[in-house]
Image (cartoon, rainbow, N blue to C red):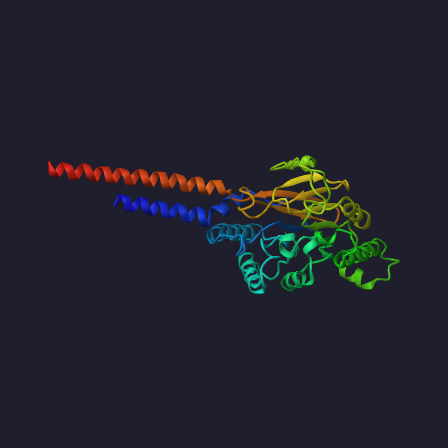
Amino acid sequence: MKLHFFLLFNVCVILFCETYLDFIVQQKCEWPSVKDNKNVLHAMILADTHLLGPIRGHWLDKLYREWHMRRSFQSSISLFNPDIIFVLGDLFDEGDLVDMQEFDSYVQRFQKYFNISHNIPLITVAGNHDVGFHYRLNEFFINRFEKHFNNTGVELYTLKDVHFVLINSMAMENDGCRYCTTAQQKLNKISDQLECLKKPSTCTDVNTLQAHKKYSRPILMQHFPTYRISDAACKEYEVQKFERYRENWEVLSKNSTVLLGKLLQPRLAFAGHSHYFCRSINSLGIEEYTVASFNWRNNINPSFLLASFTTDDYKVAKCNMLKQNIIFSVFVVLMIIYVAVLLYKIKKFIQTYFKKKS
């Protein structure tokens, strides 16, 4: 009977770890406060969910780690109820490799795991694992991602008078390709729209004035970080990589970064791609947050950001999720205890057996 009770205890501990521990860990997080709390926009920002695909993903890895992503996300929604959610690229691990059937399966899984109420916008930007690096960009990959998600290029998005510029990092190579040319044209248009909002009395663009209301310096949202030589620029970090970053592979190029600064004059930037958290002052002289991967497969200590925005202020807080090694440690301890109890029971049984024989 005692063994049965112990087994029940093990099951309860496992269920606790797999269902409620995420919720308890995230309760330590809270929205950062800003000066004007009445008109604040609360944004949850995550990146690099990397849902596994049929080529590189093992079914057990897919089952276990994606279960925890789902649990973590739903816990965060229940706790924080954000006004908006951003996913900064690489939703999928093999989005640029799979056929249409597998891609549709990807989309269904993403929508199932990151299910939210209809009144919370979920805004995505494309990552290199979603549509391919610059050299792999083509209409087929772009169109099928755009069919299910809301951004594959350069867009201006406004909520509560806070302006976000969503950017396809892979279209920022400035080499004259079709996607780069389109991105440049849209950046010029957004620059004109922001100038219009600066001078509403002389602006004749009625649509811009109606859609975006009043001017505030925009916030960059993209997959690649802006140009930096290495993670030596990070003021806060998890893993600091001192090897030199390659332009248009790990970070945007110098030229593209300068162009974004010249046209948009942003006040803040967010990106993903590196899989590890970094807060830096970028080459534009503004604060940039590189968001850690949301997936245990890429980072054993995943996290996301909670950001409070107004038109002239912001505060950002890093929210740590349940660490993978905590779960593994609990399971190892349970297994050791289970084996010890089992061996003890076997020993008692053998002693009793030979005692009766004698």
Q: Position of residue 77 (x, y in %)?
A: 56, 53
How many marks do you count on the picture?
A: 0
- Furthest toward the left, the residue is 358
Task: From the viewer's perspective, tell me whether residue 245 is left or right of residue 348.
Answer: right
Residue nearest the observer in this picture, 40 or 62:
62
Q: Position of residue 145 (x, y in %)?
A: 64, 61
* Residue at 57% across, 48% down: 294
Task: From the viewer's perspective, tell me whether residue 28 is left or right of residue 135.
Answer: left
Task: From the viewer's perspective, tell me whether residue 328 is left or right of residue 227.
Answer: left
* Residue at 46% across, 48% down: 20
* Residue at 74% across, 52% down: 172
- 165 vs 6: above or below: below
Residue nearest the observer in this picture, 65 or 206:
65
Residue nearest the observer in this picture, 254 or 202:
254
Q: Position of residue 166 (x, y in %)?
A: 71, 54
Check the picture and name the quadrant holding the C terminus: top left
Q: Is residue 33 visible?
A: no
Q: Position of residue 25 (x, y in %)?
A: 51, 43
